[in-house]
């Protein structure tokens, strides 16, 4: 199917020329719709020094539906659900805002950008967002603790 | 009036309802073509403005096609209409021409910064669909192929994304043309937020850009009919003609019915292939073939083989049933044109006072028996469009009305004496209804010359006096000889 063709193209491109701070692997040789990304924390952020495993699931309608992101490594962040799914869904990742010419590489760049600059107005974890806005010190402290606890 | 008696709250309520109109989100992505009276029925209990507008709709737009309101109906309707226009044109070359044209637009896509690796997937599916429809054209299955393809959601995604990418690229590379239409937004911002996202429905600006890049250059016009609560008896229509493109030639028109938030496709009768003409059309000439073997009446059949020629029984002098329509359509099928002698009361050379049935005898009921079992293939293909047939009948009526039988009748054998040319009056011969003109390279309209009036003594046909109209015929006959 043509969707698969597209995935193969992107996989080839991203493996030969990965975005900064990202590496990609396929957990299963037979399933090209699940990718594993290892994302390093942006150096100028509270997440510096950590590495996060993110599972990217490409729906069978890809590229007409957005990839789904799931943080397999816990992260303290207003835009990532604080549960076992660890879902991130904002901006271009929303189904009605997704554009078929967007690439997975673009998605990964977005993830790193959001790690560097959390977007509390688009938060899924409202209490973390509130803390990020009103008590930045406390937020930074917990986030760094989580990096040391989970992401190293 | 009921409308004026409504309180402001009621009007506001109705306006709210019309704003909240939610089109069907179930059903096929593209429905079948249906009579547009269904829309009138749908709004029969709506408020008076909608009632009046939808009641007037079927008079001009006989059919419509429902498109699923999933937020992409505008894009889908235009894409569908584009293919339908190409199918209706039926020109194989146009498909190839269009594919070449769209392929050449990859320059625009590249210039706008779209990655060829990505957009070629969308474009390839579009071109493949064009070829599939094109290949189904000779078998007459193009419409079926198109309908199936547009109801395949996977394929549909590619086609619509292709159009969106094309529209964005066109706008981004012509920002000066479109920027004035956008408020507080640059063209690239608009494209990213309101064109490219999967859920983004077409709006006025993207519609205009899509029309420019996709339709106008192909020579396809676009009409949008707005069905809303503005005053008026009819839907408001905005038409975009491809004036500056394609040499100004319009190959088709896409008509969209817009209800706030939703598009469907509308059709006029001429927009789609017509069903086969009524049986009666070929019953008339078919029956001659079967009932009257040429040998029995002994007419010289070589005359009937000549395109544009028809031999007509002298007593059937005037419009003998469908003989004129006949010889035009039967040029490649050697159909005998002779009429049954049974029909003619054989008026001899004697003054006739009673109107004769022969003058206006369009297909007597006895002729309208069962259709011939075997129709020559040509006839089915060249079946007479029904309106042409009406024109023909109208002409018959027109002639049979004021025409009075002449006191002068031709003798038997007259036609043989004049080399058996088609026996036609000068009035009909020069009429634009006479299709024989089409086939006669030497045709010249008759001109009146004063000197022709002065002498008529050189006629010697064994009859002492013939009516002037027939004289003129004979004059012309001689020159053909």
Image (tube, grey):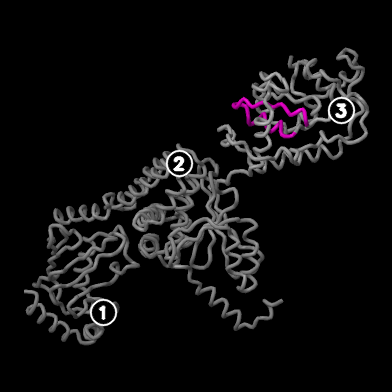
Which residue lies at the image location 62% right of the left edge and 36% below the top edge?
B372
**Camera-side residue: B453 or B391?**
B391
Please tell me the numbered disc located at residue B347: 3
Between the C-alphas of marks 2 and 3, the distance is 54 Å
- Give me the chain letter of mark 3: B
Neighbourhood count class around disc 3 (C-alpha, 10 Å): few under 14, some 14–19, many 20 upward: some
- Tell me which segment is drawn in magenta: B321-342
Q: Is residue B476 above or below residue A60?
A: above
Neighbourhood count class around disc 1 (C-alpha, 10 Å): few under 14, some 14–19, many 20 upward: many
Q: Are marks 1 and 3 on the same chain?
A: no
Name the quarter where the C terminus of chain B is drawn: top right
| Contact (Cβ within 8 Å) of mark 1 with mark 3 | no
Which residue lies at the image location 12% right of the left edge and 74% below the top edge?
A73
Residue A106 percent coordinates (x, y): 23, 62
Whether residue A117 is visible? yes
Name the quarter where the N terminus of chain B is drawn: bottom right
Q: Which residue is mark 2?
A: B137
Which structural element holds mark 1? loop
Please tell me the numbered disc located at residue A124: 1
């Amino acid at each position: 199917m043509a969707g698969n063709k597209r995935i193969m193209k992107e996989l080839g491109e991203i493996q030969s020329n990965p975005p900064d701070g990202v590496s990609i692997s396929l957990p299963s040789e037979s399933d090209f719709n699940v990718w594993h990304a290892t994302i390093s924390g942006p150096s100028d952020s509270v997440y510096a020094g950590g590495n996060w495993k993110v599972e990217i699931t490409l729906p069978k309608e890809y590229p007409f539906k957005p990839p789904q992101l799931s943080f397999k490594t816990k992260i303290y962040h207003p835009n990532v659900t604080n549960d076992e799914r660890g879902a991130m869904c904002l901006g271009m990742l929303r189904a009605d805002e997704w554009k078929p010419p967007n690439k997975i590489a673009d998605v990964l760049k977005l993830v790193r950008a959001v790690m560097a600059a959390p977007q509390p107005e688009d938060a899924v974890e409202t209490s973390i967002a509130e803390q990020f806005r009103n008590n930045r010190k406390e937020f930074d402290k917990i986030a760094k603790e989580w990096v040391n606890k989970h992401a190293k | 009036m009921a409308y004026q008696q409504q309180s402001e709250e009621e009007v506001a309520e109705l306006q709210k309802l019309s704003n909240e109109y939610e089109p069907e989100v179930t059903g096929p992505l593209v429905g079948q073509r249906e009579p547009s009276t269904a829309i009138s029925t749908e709004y029969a209990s709506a408020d008076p403005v909608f009632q009046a507008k939808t009641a007037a709709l079927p008079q001009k737009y006989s059919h419509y096609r429902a498109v699923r309101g999933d937020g992409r109906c505008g894009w889908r309707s235009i894409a569908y209409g584009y293919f339908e226009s190409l199918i209706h044109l039926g020109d194989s070359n146009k498909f190839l021409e269009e594919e070449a044209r769209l392929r050449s637009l990859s320059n625009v896509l590249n210039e706008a910064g779209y990655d060829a690796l990505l957009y070629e997937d969308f474009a390839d599916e579009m071109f493949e669909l064009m070829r599939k429809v094109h290949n189904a054209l000779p078998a007459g299955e193009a419409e079926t192929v198109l309908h199936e393809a547009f109801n395949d959601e996977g394929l549909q995604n590619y086609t619509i994304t292709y159009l969106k990418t094309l529209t964005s690229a066109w706008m981004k590379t012509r920002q000066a043309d479109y920027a004035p239409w956008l408020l507080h937004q640059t063209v690239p911002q608009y494209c990213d937020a309101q064109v490219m996202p999967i859920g983004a429905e077409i709006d006025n600006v993207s519609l205009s850009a899509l029309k420019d890049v996709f339709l106008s250059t192909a020579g396809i016009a676009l009409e949008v009919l707005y069905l809303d609560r503005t005053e008026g008896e009819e839907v408001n229509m905005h038409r975009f003609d491809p004036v500056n493109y394609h040499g100004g030639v319009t190959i088709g028109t896409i008509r969209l019915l817009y209800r706030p938030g939703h598009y469907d496709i509308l059709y006029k009768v001429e927009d789609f292939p017509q069903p086969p003409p009524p049986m009666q059309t070929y019953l008339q000439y078919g029956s001659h073939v079967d009932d009257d073997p040429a040998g029995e009446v002994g007419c010289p059949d070589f005359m009937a083989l000549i395109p544009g020629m028809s031999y007509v029984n002298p007593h059937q002098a005037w419009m003998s049933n469908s003989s004129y329509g006949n010889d035009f359509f039967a040029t490649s099928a050697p159909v005998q044109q002779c009429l049954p002698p049974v029909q003619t009361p054989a008026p001899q050379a004697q003054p006739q006072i009673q109107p004769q049935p022969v003058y206006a005898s369009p297909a007597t009921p006895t002729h309208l028996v069962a259709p011939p079992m075997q129709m020559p293939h040509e006839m089915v293909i060249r079946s007479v469009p029904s309106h042409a047939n009406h024109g023909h009948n109208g002409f018959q009526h027109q002639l049979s009305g004021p025409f009075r039988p002449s006191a002068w009748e031709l003798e038997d054998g007259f036609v043989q004496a004049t080399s058996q040319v088609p026996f036609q009056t000068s009035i009909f011969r020069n009429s634009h209804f006479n299709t024989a003109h089409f086939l006669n390279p030497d045709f010249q309209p008759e001109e009146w010359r004063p000197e022709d009036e002065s002498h008529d003594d050189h006629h010697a046909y064994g009859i002492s006096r013939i009516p002037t109209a027939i004289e003129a015929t004979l004059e012309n006959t001689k020159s053909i000889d």
